[in-house]
Image (spheres, rainbow, N blue to C red):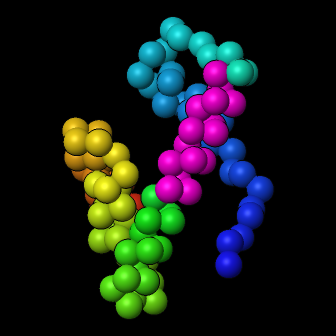
């Protein structure tokens, strides 16, 4: 069974990251919509793969291990390594707060 939810909007976060990386750069509404769709698509792919991994391993819960494995399967090489590293850093920061 597949559930269809209204897509989440990450526009404010995309804008904040853009300003951290390139403070003098703007983004058009079309480009922002494309970036938002991209993030929703990647999120869906990672969540779907993590769900399949948990089911395959007969686990009722998706853990950080399934998320990391899903990221490694979906994203190519260095991008996957960087994503796992940044994700681990974010989880550590969140759990120690």
Q: Position of residue 95 (x, y in %)?
A: 36, 67
> In the visual, does 39 lie left or right of 70?
right
In the image, residue 8 above or below residue 11? below
Q: Position of residue 33 (x, y in %)?
A: 69, 30
Residue range highlighted in magenta = 31-45
- Dominant secondary structure of the residues highlighted in magenta in the image: helix
> In the visual, does 44 lie left or right of 54?
right
> In the visual, does 46 lie left or right of 88?
right
At horizontal 72% and vertical 51% (from top left) the residue drawn is: 7
At horizontal 50% and vertical 24% (from top left) the residue drawn is: 18
Q: Is residue 97 visible?
A: no
Q: Quadrant of residue 30?
A: top right
Q: Position of residue 76 (x, y in %)?
A: 29, 42
Name the foreground residue: 67 vs 24: 67
Q: Position of residue 1 (x, y in %)?
A: 68, 78
In the image, residue 22 above or below residue 12? above
Q: Which quarter of the rendering shows the C terminus?
A: bottom left
Name the foreground residue: 67 vs 56: 56
At horizontal 44% and vertical 25% (from top left) the residue drawn is: 20
Q: Is residue 7 visible?
A: yes
Q: Is residue 42 magenta?
A: yes
In the image, residue 58 above or below residue 54? below
At horizontal 43% and vertical 83% (from top left) the residue drawn is: 55
In this rendering, the count of numbered labels is 0
Task: Residue lying at the far right in this picture: please name it.
Answer: 6
């Amino acid at each position: 069974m597949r559930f269809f939810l209204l897509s989440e909007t990450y526009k404010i976060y995309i804008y904040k990251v853009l300003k951290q990386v390139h403070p003098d750069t703007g983004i058009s509404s079309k480009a922002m919509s494309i970036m938002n769709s991209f993030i929703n698509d990647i999120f869906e792919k990672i969540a779907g793969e993590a769900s399949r991994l948990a089911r395959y391993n007969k686990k009722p819960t998706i853990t950080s291990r399934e998320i990391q494995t899903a990221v490694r399967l979906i994203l190519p090489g260095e991008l996957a390594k960087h994503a796992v590293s940044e994700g681990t850093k974010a989880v550590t920061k969140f759990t120690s707060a």
